[in-house]
Amino acid sequence: MAHYQPTDGIVVVTGGASGIGLALAQRFAADGARVVLADLDGARAARAAYALGEGHGGIGLDVTDEEAVARAVDRIEDELGPIGMWCSNAGVATPPGLGTDADWELAWGVHVLAHLYAARTVLPRMVERGRGHFLVTASAAGLLTELDVAAYAVSKHGAVALAEWLAIRYGGTGVTFSCLCPQGVRTPLLDGAPADSATLAAAPLLEPSQVADCVVEAIDEGRFLILPHPEVAQYSLNRVTDPDRWLGGMRKLYQRLHP
């Protein structure tokens, strides 16, 4: 069983300047960790890190740039010390429907390739040390679907699949893994969501701090799959055991939201 040890190395949180990422950083910092917030908006990450107090840092990082990720890992470990936890958390919203090729490239880059690039860079170091934790923030959409945005639904399925593969391949090395799959959370990704948004209709929105609490609890208990909305487990079971009925129910929900 894994045990939550926030002080065992540097904690890096991507997408750390807002939303779930910021809440994770705040929780880890409160528990004694030294945190680096990495975000596409480097200035915002630096301000957020300053608000956490002395000893924390904020950097600009495009998680879809593998060379930039490698440079960031080198810099953090050279200047601050070994990375004990990597929270691969950055996310992006794309327009509804089937979208454009550019929408798919963006969603795939942030929701799948970013986890891959982080794993290629930081996991070998964790494996060599025989300890560490790697968290992938996916979504309940990766276990079920997202009715409005195809690129989001498909790329989040990819995130879950990659997190599972990593846990199978490297789970016996001393490194632990978790995959975070919430439904709606009150983050900037939902800013401007229309009233007929399937995400808003699916379940009550959680606060990012509630999600962070769920993450800490799951890591301490050694659970891979983190479901801040516990009903997602039953929905996922329904999807697997009777897919035709589940698809029919989802169609009805979509039709109700988009009459």
Image (cartoon, rainbow, N blue to C red):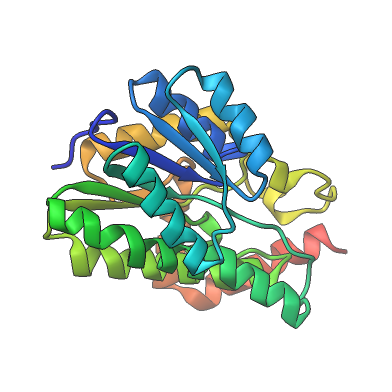
Asked if residue 108 lies left or right of residue 81, the reply is: right
Asked if residue 227 lies left or right of residue 201, the reply is: left
State whether residue 166 is above or below residue 105: above
Residue 148: image location, x then y, percent: 73, 65
Q: Which residue is pictured at 43% across the width and 67% down the height?
A: 117
Front position in the image: 33 or 242: 33
Residue 203: image location, x then y, percent: 62, 43
Q: Which residue is pictured at 22% across the width and 37% down the height?
A: 221
Residue 84: image location, x then y, percent: 27, 42
Q: Which residue is pictured at 32% across the width and 57% down the height?
A: 122
Q: Quadrant of the N terminus?
A: top left
Asked if residue 211 lies left or right of residue 48, the reply is: left
Front position in the image: 210 or 83: 83
Front position in the image: 189 or 70: 70
Q: Is residue 11 visible?
A: yes
Residue at the right extreme, as displayed: 259
Q: Is residue 205 visible?
A: no
Residue at the bottom extreme, as displayed: 101
Tell me how many marks there are.
Answer: 0
Q: Quadrant of the C terminus?
A: bottom right
Q: Which residue is pictured at 41% across the width and 68% down the height?
A: 116
Residue 222: image location, x then y, percent: 21, 43
Asked if residue 125 lies left or right of residue 50, the reply is: left
State whether residue 25 is above or below residue 222: above
